[in-house]
Amino acid sequence: MATRAGAIPASTFASPLRYRGNLPLRVAVYSEVAGAIRGGVIGPGQMLPSEPELSSAFAVSRSVMREALILLEEDGLIRNQRGIGRFVVDVIPAIGLEQLHPIERMLAAPGPAYSVRRRKANLETSTDFTQRGLQVPDDAVILMWESLIVGDGVPLALAQEWVPGEDRLAVTHPELKAELQERHADPVSMLAVLSDRFGAALGPSSCEVSVSTAGSERAHALEVTSGSPILVLTQRVLLDGSPIYVAKHLITPEAGHLTVVQTSSP
């Protein structure tokens, strides 16, 4: 099927669809296109292939593709110009703190191209913070990932993430245990792996915001002076009503703005 004149090639989306867990197909397709837009694969103002072309590229039905496109419009990522086609908006909206997203996706929209560099992936004994956050015993062994989020070669954030240990995951979520083992070296955060696996079933979550200063070890990782101000985001995520993930994200001023969308009280 030929792509209409002026549109990006449908082959842009020819890779296999990453369908994981109980994520609905429309949401999986939405995530693929949204990721391509936010990642710069599709630029602002570019025309998308037609609905039939996209359906063929993703190997999904027209109705699934249509629902995914509606979600993209609702989130302000594309606009529909009747009689002509769908276009990526000129200004990509920022991801707000009121939505559950991996830290690298929050920092990348809008912003520079980013990368996730794993610094640590190991088992450790729980601390007071992780005991309370994950509701595990004081001698529990838990899994920890530490990653550096880099934009245009500049460190933007240090992500420290924890999930229950492998023994507990083997009982409650064996598929997640296996996936974390397989993807420990992938350039993504731990929350990105959980989001890919569980999709809309993940949550609810909370995010606390505070201001602190970088100690010597964290300052070295972030390439800032010890004592420099940093923004701290503390996340806690539930799955099926139980804690599955806690994190601390230490963000430098170079990361720019993070958005919080507010609405009027009812």
Image (cartoon, helix red, strand yellow):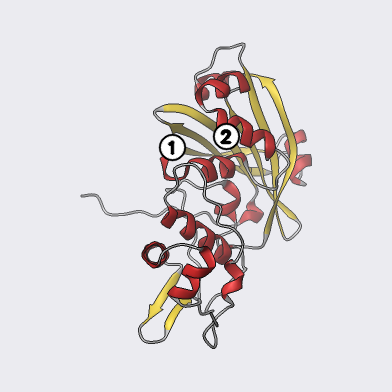
Query: In which quadrant of the rendered view does residue 169 lie?
Result: top right
The percent coordinates of residue 168 (x first, y second) are: 56, 20
Please give the label number shown on residue 118. none
Residues 109 and 20: in front is: 20
Q: Residue at x 66, y 55 (%)?
A: 254
Which secondary structure, mark 1? strand
Residue under pointer 2: 247
Residue 129 visible in the picture: no
Whether 232 is drawn above or below 150: the answer is: above
Determine the image quadrant of residue 220: top right
Callouts 2 and 1 close, C-beta under 8 Å? no
The label number, if any, that marks residue 205 in the structure image: 1
Report the side of 58 relative to 153 (left or right). left
Instruction: Give the crowd class for mark 2: few <14, some 14-19, many >=20 residues within 10 Å.
Output: many
261 horizontally vs 32: left or right: left
**Rendered position, 46 above or below 125:** below
Point 52% across, 44% down: residue: 195
Asked where in the image residue 78 lies, by quadrant, the reply is bottom left
Which badge, 2 or 1, comes first in the chain's sequence? 1
Q: Residues within 10 Å of mark 1 (few under 14, many from 20)?
A: some
Residue type at numbered disc 2 = Ala
Q: Where is 185 relative to 244, above or below?
A: below
Query: CA separation, marks 2 and 1?
Result: 11 Å
